[in-house]
Amino acid sequence: MDIIQVTNLKKYYGKHLGIENVSFSVKKGEILGFVGPNGAGKSTTIRILLNFIFPNGGNATICGKDVVKESHEIKKFTGYVPSDVRFYGDMTVKELIRVSNDFYDGSHDKEAERLCNLFELNNSKKFYELSTGNKKKAAIICALAAKPKVLILDEPTNGLDPMMQKRLFAELKNQSANGASILLSSHNLGEVQEYCHRVAFIKQGKILAITDLKEMRHPHKIITTIGGKDIIHPSMEFWNKGK
């Protein structure tokens, strides 16, 4: 069952291409890696899914709900981690988590406390006092505490040390096993290869290929791009500098 469905999304910034004909899906319980260089169109796609910006064409749904017309409903079951974390500086981590989880039904204090312990984050500190890595941890906890059906994560490992990255992915695998559908944006193919079920490659605003991770782990596997004109070996850093 497709929980996130993206069909021919287009976005232009004036005359400049953001994304063009972007299509992919995320199934129930799946972690889909969304891989490409900075400026490839990952964040633009995510911002459309969250109704932060409007597309110029195409459509997208989350749990069957249109991302433009029904965004308020979508927020009730979707967790989001931005690449650049900005919260109210004078609020404590505990206060931020509670405000973030007001979108969801029920109390999630116990789960938030568990996640704070897991990520070794002092929830009594104010946001402005936190390091870059701890700010990212706060955003992750805000997104995960309510155990939402859908998680959209934009470069979630930025700022995290290797140990915390492993803890994050272990937690994401657990949530995926419990039915959560996860879209994970990254420019790091290594982390995606290890933890995601499938990968969608994006470059210069266009999807190049979507492949199963079992295929990518084959040492001699060649991935045929959409359109069949080019081939990509997974070891190639084809996204370097967006070229």
Image (tube, rainbow, N blue to C red):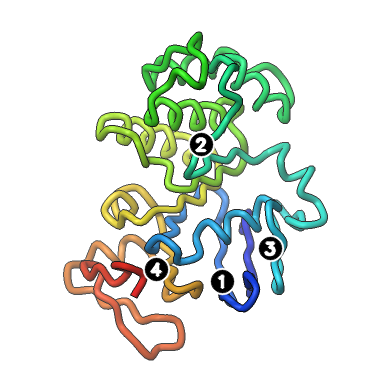
Compared with 48, 226 (above or below) is: below
Q: Quadrant of the N terminus?
A: bottom right
Estimate the spatial distance between the alpha carbons at disc 4 and disc 3, rounded to whole Å: 20 Å
Q: Nearer the viewer, mark 4 or mark 2?
A: 2
* Residue shown at 45% from the left, 66% from the top: 40
Q: Which residue is mark 1?
A: 19
Task: Look at label 3 and name its amino acid.
Answer: Ala
Residues at discs 4 and 2 in contact (Cβ within 8 Å)? no
Which label number is shown at residue 60? 3
Query: Which label's residue is closer to the chain start, 4 or 1?
Result: 1
Q: Nearer the viewer, mark 4 or mark 1?
A: 1
From the top left corner, tell me how far across and down residue 104 is, in percent.
71, 29
Q: Quadrant of residue 12?
A: bottom right
**Looking at this view, is 42 or 149 the one in front?**
42
Compared with 87, 242 (above or below) is: below
Q: Quadrant of residue 39?
A: bottom left
Estimate the spatial distance between the alpha carbons at disc 1 and disc 2, rounded to whole Å: 23 Å
Q: Nearer the viewer, mark 2 or mark 3?
A: 2
Q: Which residue is mark 4?
A: 211
* Residue shown at 32% from the left, 76% from the top: 223
Q: Which residue is mark 2?
A: 85
Q: Residues within 10 Å of mark 4 (few under 14, many from 20)?
A: some
Q: Secondary structure at mark 2?
A: loop
Q: Residues within 10 Å of mark 1 (few under 14, many from 20)?
A: many
Estimate the spatial distance between the alpha carbons at disc 4 and disc 1, rounded to whole Å: 20 Å
Query: Which label's residue is closer to the chain start, 3 or 1?
Result: 1
Q: Is residue 54 left or right of residue 132?
A: right
Compared with 181, 211 (above or below) is: below
